[in-house]
Image: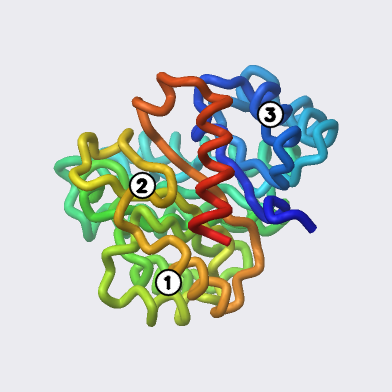
Amino acid sequence: MTDLARLSIHTMTTKPWTLEQAAAKYAAAGVGGITVWRQHLAPYGAKQGREILRRHGLTCTALCRGGFFPAVDQAGRDKAIEDNRVAIRDAHELGAPQVVLVCGAVPGIPLADARRMVEDGIRAVEPEARAAGVNLAIEPLHPMYAADRSCITTLGEARRLCERIASPAVGIALDVFHVWWDPQLADEIRLAAKWTCGFHVCDWRAPLRDMLNDRSIMGDGCIPVRAIGQQVRAAGFAGFDEVEIFSDELWAGDQDALLARILAAYRQHCV
């Protein structure tokens, strides 16, 4: 097994590449897995997407993303639920074991109400996910996104949501960018171990120039990526390390050079 065999890269990390280009480049570099974003899958469809990954020998680690359950009215909530059902069907056809959920939030909706909408939405689609063999991976986001992207902001909150729903088809995607700051992180990694089904890595630039699209390559920021990864694996996680980087600066550059930098950083700071 090569040192890149358990590495997966999100297609959004090399956003300018098509799914076909990303799959070919990742595989040629020796990367073992790929997480497919829905906008990269859309031009092909799930059936053709699965064939692309098969042809390049890549393991699909997830389809990203579902969620966004809260809405100001029932019609909006119903629309979100139907979109998640589509994502589940696409994940099943693609061969993705899970759909990553960015749970959602809406300015003006109290967080307590939004959290109830998230739980109700997950419960609404859970039977279909379970029947399809697709996990719903709740991704807690950093609190700076609580107003408009996710009302689920800590690993502990995601764990308690999993406990309440109590389904084998509901788990957690742990992203170091969102949880590294948490003083309870070490304890929560252990407590959430039975639900952890995804592990995302990148780094936090200081100062952060943009809330969404200024993530850094591992080792270029202040997150102790290797230490967190060791804790996650010590707790029992045996899946892929998924590199997920949103960066306007990096997307504007040479994507082949970016991939080479990611591989070097992964070897130096993650394994």
Front-most of 88 and 51? Answer: 51
Q: Inspect the image, locate mark 3, and give the three-letter code of the amino acid beneath it.
A: Lys
Residue at coordinates 30% horizontally, 56% vertically from top-left?
Answer: 222
Q: Nearer the viewer, mark 2 or mark 3?
A: 2
Q: Dot 1, crowdedness within 10 Å: few (<14), some or many (≥20)?
A: many
Of callouts 2 and 1, the N-terminal one: 1
**At x 44% / y 40%, what residue is drawn?**
245
- Position of 92 with respect to 163 (left or right) is right
Q: Up-down: is 149 above or below 188? A: above
Q: Which residue is mark 3?
A: 25
* Residue 195 seen anywhere in this rendered image of the structure: yes
Q: Which residue is mark 2?
A: 220
Q: Nearer the viewer, mark 1 or mark 3?
A: 3
For label 3, the SS is helix
Q: Residues within 10 Å of mark 3 (few under 14, many from 20)?
A: some
Q: Where's residue 119, x and y in %?
A: 40, 59
- In the rendered structure, find residue 159 and report the number of the disc placed on it: 1
Q: CA distance from mark 1 to mark 3?
A: 35 Å
Q: CA distance from mark 2 to mark 3?
A: 23 Å
Crowdedness near tag 2: few (<14), some (14–19) or many (≥20) residues, C-alpha within 10 Å? some
The quadrant in which the C terminus is found is bottom right
Q: Residue at point 48% right, 43% down?
A: 244
Image vertical order of residue 253 relative to residue 81, above or below: above
| Badge nearest the viewer, 2 or 1 | 2
Q: What numbered label is drawn on residue 31?
A: none
Left or right placement of residue 197 versus residue 216 in this view: right
